[in-house]
Amino acid sequence: DGTTTGRFSSQNPNLQNIPIKSELGKRIRAGFIAPEGSTLVSFDYSQIELRVAAFLSQDEYFVKTFRDNHDVHAAVAMKVFHVAEKDITHDMRRRAKVINFGILYGMGVPALTQNLGTTRAEAQAFHDAYFAEFPTIKAYLDGVLETAKKKGYTETLFGRKRYFKDLRSTLPFMRAMAERMAVNAPIQGTAADIM
């Protein structure tokens, strides 16, 4: 663990980010061999941070989406773009995915604009539509930030604290960065605790 959120990390080499789809990536992965009598396993908890956000916020739509084993990005695309499931395009799902993770990571409209590759006005519209469709998520994230500002820290579901001294910084960019990290910390940290 080399991260402030408690996530697993590795470096020199970063074994978590070896490409899987390219031919080179497949060749690199073939170089990892378990010793005699052992087995090398790889696992991934599908969309764990979005699942944790659904649980912590108790947003009914997200919880139902996961309980019914539906694609959460498609489910969000249906709401944000006001389309039926059959009418979701690849680009709509991609944008919904960017918005889902962007919101959880505390991205503001400028970062969403860049990550979506769109105009600021369109990113603002997506941002506003997301929170209009998911007020429970907004209320949860707002509550996390409010509590962090009062206490100076956030907590994971399991009680692990992360402190944010810059929440009281006089420098607006430092304060904004601390706010973004604080909003995400209980979600990312709880996911790390589970793993």
Image (tube, rainbow, N blue to C red):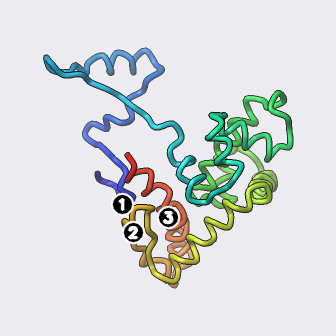
Spot occupied by residue 147 in the image (x, y as percentages of width and height): 54, 77
- 2 or 3: mark nearer the eye: 2
Please state which of residues 98 and 139 is positioned toward the viewer in this rendering.
Answer: 139
Relative height, residue 50 to residue 135 (above, below): above
| Spatial CA span between label 2 and label 3 | 10 Å
Disc sitting over residue 181 in the figure: 3
Q: Residue at x 67, y 52 (%)?
A: 112
Residue labelled with disc 2? 162
Relative height, residue 103 to residue 13 (above, below): below
Please state which of residues 57 and 67 is positioned toward the viewer in this rendering.
Answer: 67
Image quadrant holding the C terminus, namely top left
Residue labelled with disc 1? 4
- Going by the image, does 71 lie left or right of 55? right
| Spatial CA span between label 3 and label 1 | 10 Å
Please state which of residues 116 and 131 is positioned toward the viewer in this rendering.
Answer: 131
User: Circle 3 — which element?
Assistant: helix
User: Circle 1 — which element?
Assistant: loop
Relative height, residue 75 to residue 154 (above, below): above
Q: Residue at x 63, y 57 (%)?
A: 58
Spot occupied by residue 149 in the image (x, y as percentages of width and height): 52, 80
User: What count of labels does the image hold?
Assistant: 3
**Badge 2: residue crowd in 10 Å (few <14, some 14–19, many ≥20):** many
Relative height, residue 104 to residue 9 (above, below): below
Q: Quadrant of residue 129?
A: bottom right
**Badge 1: residue crowd in 10 Å (few <14, some 14–19, many ≥20):** few
Q: Which of pointers 2 and 3 lies earlier in the amino acid sequence?
A: 2
Q: Are marks 2 and 3 in contact (CB under 8 Å)?
A: no
| Spatial CA span between label 2 and label 1 | 8 Å
Q: Are marks 2 and 1 in contact (CB under 8 Å)?
A: yes
Q: Residue at x 46, y 37 (%)?
A: 45
